[in-house]
């Protein structure tokens, strides 16, 4: 079966750095997405990786290792507004997105 | 309209009733999707459409139907609602069905009693 694993919840301090991991086992691979979802709101796109390596976009970076079935999202200089759930999703061989359950990130002052 | 909209925002429904959730996008996207989101689970795909006139089944299609008469609209119908269909429903769209970025509507919170 297809499976996306990410931690249920993480806590970090304002101004710090946090890394959210995602491991996957899917039928085929056509890219990996990270989305942010604030409570009660819709998911919004953060990043996309299809090749191995690090993609940097401001305070957010995303890394992919296809051979290990592994990705992480790195958030730097954490702000209170970064408190949200972070969703990992893999595009499978049918070009459908398979979603993880999300990681709830709590930022403390 | 800017982006993707859904209606209603929330709804309480008696079991056995028929309900249609509406979704409209103005981005001229070819592909559209319906997901449900339940606590502790990832988004699960109900139905999708890669282009107007075509639809396909996702991971959890039972009890739901869709139609795609035109590019902009993608309604989701529950023919006879059951309590297990209590969930938050998100409609999404993307340029194509080829695994590109999906844009989400604000969601519909549905409670079936």
Image (tube, rainbow, N blue to C red):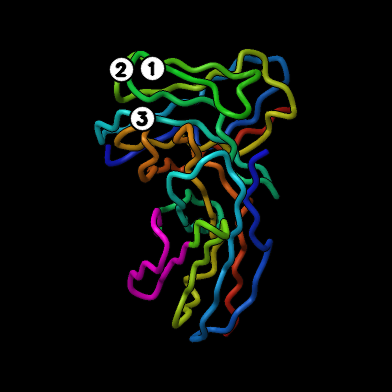
Percent from the top left, x then y, of residue B34?
50, 31
| For the residues bearing labels 3 and 1, Cβ distance under 8 angstroms | no
At x 46%, y 52%, the residue is A32
- Residue A10 in view: yes
User: Tag 2 or tag 3, which sits nearer the N-term?
Assistant: 3
- Please state the chain letter of the residue tagged with numbered disc 3 in the rendered image: B
- Residue A48 in view: no
In terms of image quadrants, where is residue A9?
bottom right
Compute the Cα span from label 3 to label 1. 10 Å
**Residue A57, magenta (yes or no):** yes
The range drawn in magenta is: A47-64
What number is the disc on residue B30?
Answer: none
Percent from the top left, x then y, of residue A45?
40, 54
In terms of image quadrants, where is residue B68?
top left
For label 3, the residue is: B31
Compute the Cα span from label 2 to label 1. 6 Å
- Please state the chain letter of the residue tagged with numbered disc 1 in the rendered image: B
For label 1, the residue is: B68
Q: Mark 2: which secondary structure?
A: loop
In the displayed structure image, the side of residue A69 where residue A32 appears, left or right: left
User: Tag 1 or tag 3, which sits nearer the N-term?
Assistant: 3
At x 53%, y 58%, the residue is A67
Q: Residues within 10 Å of mark 3 (few under 14, many from 20)?
A: many
Front one among A61 and B106? A61
Q: Residues within 10 Å of mark 1 (few under 14, many from 20)?
A: some
- Please state the chain letter of the residue tagged with numbered disc 2 in the rendered image: B
């Amino acid at each position: 079966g297809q499976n996306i694993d990410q931690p249920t919840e993480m806590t970090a301090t304002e101004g710090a750095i946090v890394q959210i991991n995602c491991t996957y086992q899917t039928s085929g691979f056509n890219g990996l997405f990270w989305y942010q979802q604030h409570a009660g709101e819709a998911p919004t796109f953060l990043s996309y990786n299809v090749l191995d390596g690090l993609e940097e976009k401001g305070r957010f970076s995303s890394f992919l290792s296809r051979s290990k079935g592994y990705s992480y999202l790195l958030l730097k200089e954490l702000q209170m507004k970064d408190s949200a759930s972070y969703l990992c999703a893999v595009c499978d061989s049918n070009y459908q997105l398979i979603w993880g359950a999300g990681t709830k990130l709590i930022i403390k002052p | 309209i800017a982006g993707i909209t859904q209606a209603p925002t929330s709804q309480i429904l008696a079991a056995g009733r028929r309900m249609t959730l509406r979704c409209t996008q103005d981005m001229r996207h070819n592909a559209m999707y319906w997901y449900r989101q339940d606590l502790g689970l990832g988004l699960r795909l109900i139905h999708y459409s890669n282009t107007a006139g075509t639809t396909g089944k996702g991971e959890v299609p039972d009890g739901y139907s869709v139609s795609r008469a035109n590019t902009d609209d993608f309604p989701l119908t529950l023919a006879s609602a059951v309590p297990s269909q209590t969930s938050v429903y998100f409609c999404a769209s993307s340029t194509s069905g080829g695994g590109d970025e999906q844009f989400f509507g604000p969601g519909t919170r549905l409670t079936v009693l």
